[in-house]
Amino acid sequence: MSSSPSPAPDLTVRPGVVSRAVSGFGTSIGVGVALGAAAWISDQLSWPSSLLIPANAIGVWLGVAFILGASARTIPTGVLRGLIGLLSAVAAYYLLFAVLGQGIRAVGASHAATVWGAVALLAGPLMGGAGSVWRYGHGWPRAIGVGVLAAALIGEGVVFGAGRLVHVDQLGTDPGAFLLAAEIVLGLALPWLLLQRGERARGYVATATLAAIATVAIGPVTTLVRALADRF
């Protein structure tokens, strides 16, 4: 046994790690601000021109958080990137309302931002984690990560488009219905596109299960949150 003392553990943080963290979270803030600004601009356009910037779709916000999570180097930082991205988006969206809006919309911006910020606190880490698990996970966790995003897209498309998508012949004249149909198609395609051949069956099982839950929950939850946010 050596009598020399053991070397002390190196507790210093390498500059490269810090710079990557700062860069990654800075990117999340930038992407979130861009999303919030795009959503605000979309709200200023009349229908159907607003559909040219579909930044107010639930699937778009969740997809951005998923991509931010997938861009991280670890699952925990993916969770944080999703959270930071959506919080930044909410902050940018309602800051624009507070500064450039008029009347009751501007006065109530802080209240609405608080409500939707609470939603971002839940959805951001969930979708950021799903994206990072898709990138770094294996087996069922990876399949479920893809299924979370796919189910959200399918759920939004079905819930808000059910009454319009039954008229297939009108898709060409109803841009909103076309957008919702595109969400459903993309959601159905994601397990095939993002998973390996041996993982796709699990991906579709996860997607079908989660899509059933999303289809039941997304309508009431969205209605409740909007009612809370609009109380000003």
Image (tube, rainbow, N blue to C red):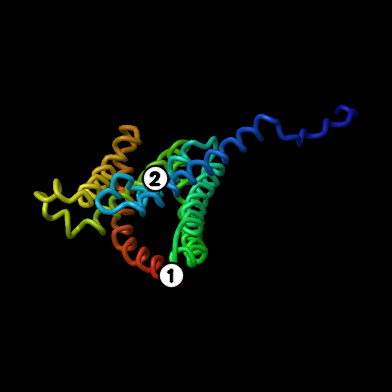
Tell me: 164 left or right of 83.
Answer: left
> Horizontal and vertical percent for residue 78?
52, 42
> Horizontal and vertical percent for residue 56?
36, 52
**Residue ID for mark 2:** 63
Rendered view: 231 above or below 170: below
Q: Quadrant of residue 43?
A: bottom left
Q: CA distance from mark 1 to mark 2?
A: 24 Å
Tell me: 43 left or right of 21.
Answer: left
Circles 1 and 2: CB distance less than 8 Å? no
Looking at the picture, which amino acid does disc 1 mark? Answer: Leu
Rendered view: 104 above or below 75: below
Placement of the N terminus among the 4 image quadrants = top right
Tell me: 63 left or right of 30.
Answer: left
Q: Farthest residue to the bottom: give it.
A: 231
Mark 2, Cα crowd under 10 Å, few <14 / some 14-19 / many 20+, is: many
- For image coordinates 29% across by 37% down, the residue present is 192
Looking at the picture, which amino acid does disc 2 mark? Answer: Gly
- For image coordinates 78% across by 34% down, the residue present is 9
Label located before the other in sequence (1 or 2): 2
- For image coordinates 36% across by 63% down, the residue present is 222
- For image coordinates 77% across by 33% down, the residue present is 10
Q: Which mark is residue 228?
A: 1
Rendered view: 183 above or below 15: below
Helix, strand or loop for disc 1? helix
From the viewer's side, name the closer residue of 182 and 106.
Answer: 106
